[in-house]
């Protein structure tokens, strides 16, 4: 037994000694992502975009060389995320913490960012209160209320007077339900029923049948990405929900590229709200998508754009501070920054350090034989409503 | 109202059929040799990936991939059985758990490496898509197919176990291993064949499952819980048990979610715990 | 007559020997102080290893010694974590009293559950523990007004330990705290295992039907050890909540129950140190593998598990015991 411990001690010591000695003119960025486990695909997409940005813009900013340290949380594991953030700060001496697909992980790491005064860029976690956790945190993705409150108001204005909501029974689902219902009711609409299904739910038909029974003019759904969007869309079609009589509305994950491929024609007519689509018509986006597909043989998604814009924020903030990488300088530089992203015009709100962007309303249509989300309406300069009310 | 209930119950029945195909192999092998094979769903995942690769890369039609999924899973299971499992027949349950969990980890990482972490889409032939209306109730065509396939498989299994010599040997080995050996039945060979068949069925189930529940590297762990529930509720070593348990769980899950959605997630676990407390050996179990 | 008392004396010697504190054990506990000197930037990891070791120890008491396989033990870990978290969130951030209250809470629930647990065995018991664990997870998810749901408990503020030592970035307080609790509980568990109660548990594990006949009522003893195990698991959960100031649903999850089971089997069940050793090896290996290869570390961990099973049956300690027994003098082995 003692031998085992000695061996372990030797291994660990060797690893410690083997860590590279870094020069003073490197800036280290710690990436905390769920590289393995259930959410591995999101990390793959985000990491791809980060690598693409570095490839396109070089790994030197303001005279300093960028170095990345990647850490895996394995999924939702806030104590692991916090420990990894601590280790990145104490052991690897990173200057910036970035990544964060999952809200609980981002919240836990926020404590480390506050205590160590490190600039932190959240590139996906979408719960509204995340950015309140640390004064050095900025977000480049989206918040759920930003999308769904806008959507609720839009739905009423577009002629839908009654709605039924169906969401996954966990944090983001509850947020989406609350936001949509609030936006819809405040605009004048009536919510005639709602249901929550379990997160790991494989079979939606019972819930879809309840929605159908309610005879609402619109059904709002929320599912996390992965297997479920296609399964839900198919269930909606199988239970015979007529897209002409009942509008099916959802958050963008419902109709992402993979889901559309799996659900086929049962997806036609679904209306979604989102902040990014790879088919968005802009020169910048077309170049971005082409480069991304060229390198990774996959279309970018919301995780990719969050990562890409997050890197842009880091680069521009560093350029603005002239290479100074302490938390106070970088967050001051980040506040109020505006730029044109492949998704459209975005900026970082100076008060909440959260993202302000255009929210698009899209419909699934067949374009050139292929199913796509076609943007047909939009709301510009949307700030996160939850934090706006908190003031 | 009754019409929509029937539709929901049918969907639950179809889902139960899928669970049956995935679980029956584990039930029989667990009952026969008491070998805890937690990697059972890795074979299912393998079958799914084989089917998807054939369809997407080589353009094979859906039906042609099903037997290949079966055979591929069976072959791999034989290889693993010869090299690793064989040595642990006499080992403790815990060691068997550890080995098979190790295999699950390796299979998940391998699947992520080879196929990526993305959801695998499946191309169904046109006549299997969409839904039909019979007697005023909408039925999804694919689920009708699943029910048919599941019942067909159940029929084949039950008749072969009841009516063939091999089936008799399987039944004897499950009932009393020592006695069966004493009567000259080669229990090891019987087990090896049963294990291959059971894993092959899991592979087939995996290929059938893609359309309903999707496929990604996490499949091997995600469905393990449901399979274990079916096996324990049905009773070890019983094909009838697996069938009844899978149908029961599928329908109660579906109908329950329709009537009392607040209990949605709890239902399947409540049903399982309740049934096990009432019948600890499972519905049709012997021990 | 002489032969009989010789046999009895030999038997006492056998038990006495087991209770005696071996030099390897002392060395082990001294080695646990090494991270303070050699691995100062790994103290957070060391703290979490100690906590997992404590959790695995609690599982060993019921699995290794009483033969109860549980796939839902994270329920008590999570109950302890949430109890400690809620106490801290609502104003009482004192660590030690929070720890005691949280562990006691987990114990009370464990006592209630033990009435169900003691009635079943084998696969039925495994599935029932799994089902109860999953039900608790879903209940915690639904009660998001209390638990914070998937986003986790927010607003925990821990006071400094013993009024002086703050829980900070560097993890010194965290590791000292976790290690101290682990050591004290370990001492108590060791005492328990070598007591007549502990011996009767081993008897129950081997043959539950026979034990009542020789004066050890199986069910009552199982209930007792299950409750004790729940208290310790709750303490581990509380430690995690307090040292990291976060609690999220994962503390109750199936993944955690499965991980601790794998860790215990890896280290070797029924040998008291198995859980701690398994925790060290599994978590350090996982940390190192995922540092090298964040996406595919699963592969290497899987290979490690397969290798351990094939080469070292009954866990690492079991395998080591088998190897070292070849080297001990035959006099010792001939004890009846």
Image (cartoon, coloured by chain):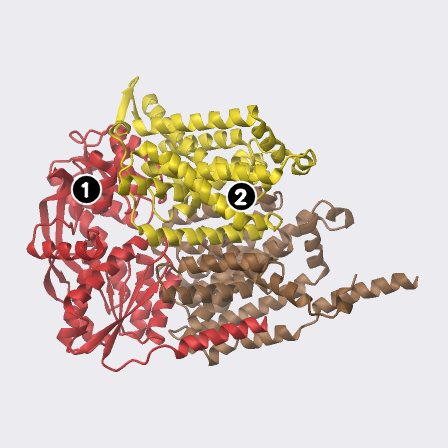
Residue in the picture at 65% in, 75% down: C23
Q: Chain of mark 1?
A: A
For this view, does A361 lie left or right of residue B287?
A: left
Quadrant of the rendering where the N terminus of chain A is positioned? bottom right
Please, is residue A296 above or below residue B10 in the view? below
Please, is residue B153 above or below residue C172 in the view? above
Residue under label 1, please give it.
Answer: A185
Q: How many angstroms separate mark 1 from mark 2 (CA)?
A: 44 Å
Please give the letter of the chain rendered in red: A
Please, is residue C191 above or below residue B238 in the view? below
Query: Residue C284: percent from the left, percent from the top?
Result: 46, 67
Query: Residue B11: percent from the left, percent from the top?
Result: 36, 29
Please give the letter of the chain rendered in yellow: B
- Quadrant of the rendered image containing residue C186: bottom right
Can the viewer see residue B264 in this picture?
yes
Residue under label 2, please give it.
Answer: C128
The mark total stands at 2
Query: Residue A289: percent from the left, percent from the top?
Result: 14, 54
Chain C drawing hue: brown
């Amino acid at each position: 037994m003692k031998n085992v411990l000695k061996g372990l001690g030797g291994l660990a010591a060797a690893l410690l000694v083997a860590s590279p000695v870094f020069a003073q003119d490197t800036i280290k960025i710690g990436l905390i992502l769920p590289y393995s486990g259930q959410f591995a695909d999101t990390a793959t997409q985000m990491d791809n975009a980060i690598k693409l940005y570095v490839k396109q813009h070089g790994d030197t900013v303001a005279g300093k060389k960028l170095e990345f340290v990647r850490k895996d949380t394995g999924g939702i594991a806030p104590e692991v995320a916090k420990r990894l953030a601590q280790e990145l700060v104490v052991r690897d001496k990173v200057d910036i913490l970035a990544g964060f697909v999952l809200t609980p992980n981002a919240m836990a790491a926020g404590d480390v960012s506050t205590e160590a005064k490190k600039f932190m860029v959240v590139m996906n976690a979408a719960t509204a209160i995340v950015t309140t956790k640390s004064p050095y945190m900025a977000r480049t993705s989206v918040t759920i209320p930003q999308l769904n409150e806008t959507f609720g108001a839009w739905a009423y204005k577009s002629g839908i007077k009654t709605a039924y909501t169906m969401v996954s029974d966990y944090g983001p689902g509850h947020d989406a339900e609350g936001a949509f219902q609030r936006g819809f009711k405040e605009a004048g609409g009536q919510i005639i029923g709602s249901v929550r299904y379990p997160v790991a739910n494989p079979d939606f038909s019972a819930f879809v049948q309840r929605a159908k029974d309610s005879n609402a003019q619109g059904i709002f759904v929320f599912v996390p990405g992965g297997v479920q969007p296609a399964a839900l869309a198919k269930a909606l079609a199988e239970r015979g929900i007529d897209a002409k009589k009942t509008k099916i509305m959802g958050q963008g994950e419902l109709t992402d590229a993979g889901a559309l491929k799996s659900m086929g024609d049962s997806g036609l007519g679904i209306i979604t709200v989102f902040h990014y689509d790879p088919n968005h018509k802009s020169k910048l986006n077309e170049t971005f998508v082409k480069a991304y597909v060229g390198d990774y043989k996959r279309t970018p998604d919301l995780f990719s754009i969050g990562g890409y814009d997050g890197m842009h924020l880091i680069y521009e903030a560093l350029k603005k501070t002239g290479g100074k990488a302490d938390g106070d300088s970088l967050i001051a530089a980040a506040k109020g920054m505006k730029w044109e992203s492949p998704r459209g015009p975005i900026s970082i709100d100076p008060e909440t350090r959260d993202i302000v962007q255009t929210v698009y309303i899209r419909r699934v249509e067949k374009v050139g034989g292929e199913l796509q989300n076609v943007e047909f309406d939009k709301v510009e300069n949307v700030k996160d409503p939850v934090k706006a009310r908190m003031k | 109202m009754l019409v929509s209930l029937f539709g929901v119950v049918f969907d639950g029945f179809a889902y139960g059929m899928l669970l049956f195909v995935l679980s029956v192999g584990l039930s029989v092998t667990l009952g026969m040799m008491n070998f805890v094979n937690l990697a059972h769903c890795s074979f299912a995942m393998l079958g799914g990936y084989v089917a998807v690769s054939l369809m997407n890369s080589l353009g094979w039609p859906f039906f042609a991939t099903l037997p290949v999924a079966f055979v591929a899973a069976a072959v791999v299971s034989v290889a693993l059985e010869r090299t690793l499992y064989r040595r642990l027949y006499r080992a403790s349950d815990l060691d068997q758990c550890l080995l098979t969990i190790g295999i699950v980890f390796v299979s998940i990482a391998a699947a992520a490496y080879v196929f990526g972490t993305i959801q695998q889409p499946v191309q169904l032939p046109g006549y299997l898509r969409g839904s039909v209306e019979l007697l005023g109730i909408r039925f999804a065509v694919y689920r009708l197919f699943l029910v048919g396939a599941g019942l067909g498989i159940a029929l084949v299994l039950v008749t072969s176990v009841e009516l063939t010599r091999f089936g008799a040997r399987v039944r004897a080995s499950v009932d009393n291993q020592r006695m069966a050996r004493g009567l000259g039945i080669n229990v090891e060979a019987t087990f090896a064949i049963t294990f291959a068949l059971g894993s092959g069925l899991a592979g087939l189930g995996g290929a059938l499952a893609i359309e309903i529940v999707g496929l990604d590297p996490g499949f091997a762990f995600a469905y393990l819980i449901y399979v274990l529930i079916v096996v324990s509720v049905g009773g070890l070593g019983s094909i009838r048990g697996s069938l009844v348990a899978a149908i029961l769980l599928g329908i109660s899950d579906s109908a329950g979610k329709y009537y009392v959605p607040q209990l949605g997630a709890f239902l399947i676990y409540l049903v399982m715990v309740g049934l096990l407390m009432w019948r600890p050996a499972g519905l049709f179990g012997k021990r | 007559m002489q032969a009989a008392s010789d046999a009895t004396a030999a038997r006492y010697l056998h038990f006495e020997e087991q209770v005696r504190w071996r030099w390897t054990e002392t060395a082990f506990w001294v080695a646990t102080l090494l991270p303070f000197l050699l691995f100062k930037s790994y103290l957070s990891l060391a703290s979490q290893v100690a906590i997992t070791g404590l959790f695995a120890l609690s599982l060993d008491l019921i699995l290794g010694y009483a033969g109860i396989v549980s796939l839902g033990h994270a329920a008590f870990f999570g109950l302890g974590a949430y109890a400690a978290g809620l106490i801290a969130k609502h104003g009482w951030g004192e660590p030690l009293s929070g720890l005691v209250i949280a562990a006691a809470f987990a114990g009370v629930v464990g006592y209630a559950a033990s009435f169900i647990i003691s009635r079943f065995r084998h696969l039925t018991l495994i599935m029932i523990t799994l089902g109860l664990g999953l039900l608790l997870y879903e209940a915690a998810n639904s009660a998001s007004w209390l638990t914070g749901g998937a986003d986790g408990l927010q607003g925990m503020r821990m006071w400094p330990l013993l009024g002086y030592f703050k829980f900070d970035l560097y993890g010194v307080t965290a590791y000292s705290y976790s290690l101290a609790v682990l050591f004290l509980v370990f001492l108590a568990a060791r005492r328990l295992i070598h007591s007549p109660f502990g011996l009767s548990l081993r008897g129950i594990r081997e043959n539950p039907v026979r034990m009542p006949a020789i004066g050890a009522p199986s069910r009552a003893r199982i209930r007792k050890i299950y409750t004790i195990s729940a208290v310790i698991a709750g303490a581990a959960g509380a430690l995690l909540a307090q040292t990291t100031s976060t609690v999220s649903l994962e503390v109750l999850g199936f993944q955690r129950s499965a991980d601790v089971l794998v860790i215990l089997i890896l280290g070797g069940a029924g040998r008291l140190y198995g859980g701690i050793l398994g925790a060290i090896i599994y978590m350090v290996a996982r940390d190192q593998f995922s540092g090298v290869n964040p996406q595919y570390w699963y592969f290497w961990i899987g290979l490690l598990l397969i290798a351990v099973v094939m080469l070292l049956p009954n866990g690492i300690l079991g395998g080591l015991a088998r190897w070292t027994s070849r080297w001990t003098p035959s006099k010792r082995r001939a004890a009846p």
